[in-house]
Amino acid sequence: MNMTKTYFDIPYASLSESQKLDIYLPEKGEKPFPVIISIHGGAFAFGDKKGPDCEAALHGLERGYAIASVNYRLSGEATFPADIEDVKAAIRFLRAHADEFSLCSEKFAVWGGSAGGALAALVGTSGDVPEFKNPTIGYVEYSDRVQAVVDWYGPINFLTMDDQFIEIGIEGQIHNSSDSFESKLMGQQITLIPDLVAKHNPETYITPDCPPFLIQHGMKDDIIPYLQSVEFAKKLESVIGKENVILELFENAGHGGPEFHSEENIRKVLDFLDARLK
């Protein structure tokens, strides 16, 4: 893959070493470039901006997208809302420096898988909500809204996942326990703090001006039940219209895998983004 310019480990804030992003600029395409912001997964506890989630997004270079891949504070370092505050700070940083990197600040999309899918969805629905604009991170005068969202198998409502696994007959990962990844992220067992958990739920913030969503999930996923995406898509559709929500369930796919990263599916994702950002 030919790339003319890459910028690695740019700090977008100064509270933590984790607050860094990478920028990849395409070789061809019209400046300023529309931007795909890649948010990595890893149960809010692991992962890195140079991982497989970013590899999927990098295919956008071939279509003239700039790619920004973001690290954020993980649950071992800081609890919610550090994760979403960081991703939004990175988006504001990119807007603040759009001219420097030839980015089109009006054409931003987010794309993430698993925990990254959850954060992409939360970015999408909670555009410019004041509670996630942490003034100590900076650039609060800029918008953190995005114009399109790609959510791959993200956990949306942490509190319904265990029951959904029972409903669909899959013996899946347990989320309601005190040592689950979600409980570690939230700083306490999730069943004891439903009000706080609701603040991480993208459904809480849905408004008619949310951007279009492409949501994809594997029906054999035993980490995050596919009903998370089904219920989320329904709620989005009821507010922003069916024409703005694409839900695709992959019958034989688990939590990620080749069905998502196939040439055909990457093309489908990029076609969705082209229709909204070009």
Image: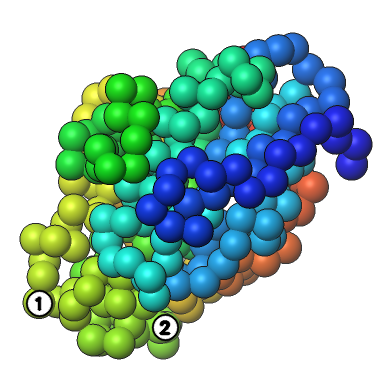
Please name the residue shown 65% across and 23% down the image.
101
Residue 153 pos. (x, y %): 48, 59
Residue situated in front as seen by the camera: 181 or 218:
181
Q: Which residue is mark 1?
A: 192
Please determine whether, in this image, residue 157 is positioned above or below residue 39: below
Quarter occupied by the C terminus: top right
Can residue 235 be seen here? The reply is no
The part of the image, by quadrant, that contains residue 201 is bottom left
Quarter occupied by the N terminus: top right
Residue 127 pos. (x, y %): 30, 32
Give amino acid for label 1: Leu
Residue 42 pos. (x, y %): 51, 69
The part of the image, by quadrant, that contains residue 36 is top right
Q: Which mark is residue 172?
A: 2
The kind of secondary structure element at disc 1 is helix
Query: How far separated are the C-alphas under marks 2 and 1?
Result: 21 Å
The kind of secondary structure element at disc 2 is loop
Residue situated in front as seen by the camera: 73 or 192:
73
Residue situated in front as seen by the camera: 192 or 186:
186
Please name the residue shown 39% across and 75% down the image.
76
Give amino acid for label 2: Gly
Residue 32 appears left or right of 117: right
Please name the residue shown 66% across and 38% down the image.
23
Q: Work out which residue is located at the far front of the displayed protein and give it.
A: 14
Please name the residue shown 43% across and 48% down the image.
14
Please determine whether, in this image, residue 45 is positioned above or below residue 244: below
Mark 2 or mark 1: name the one nearer the start of the chain.
2
Residue 141 pos. (x, y %): 30, 22
Label 2 Cα neighbours within 10 Å, binned few <14 / some 14-19 / many ≥20: some
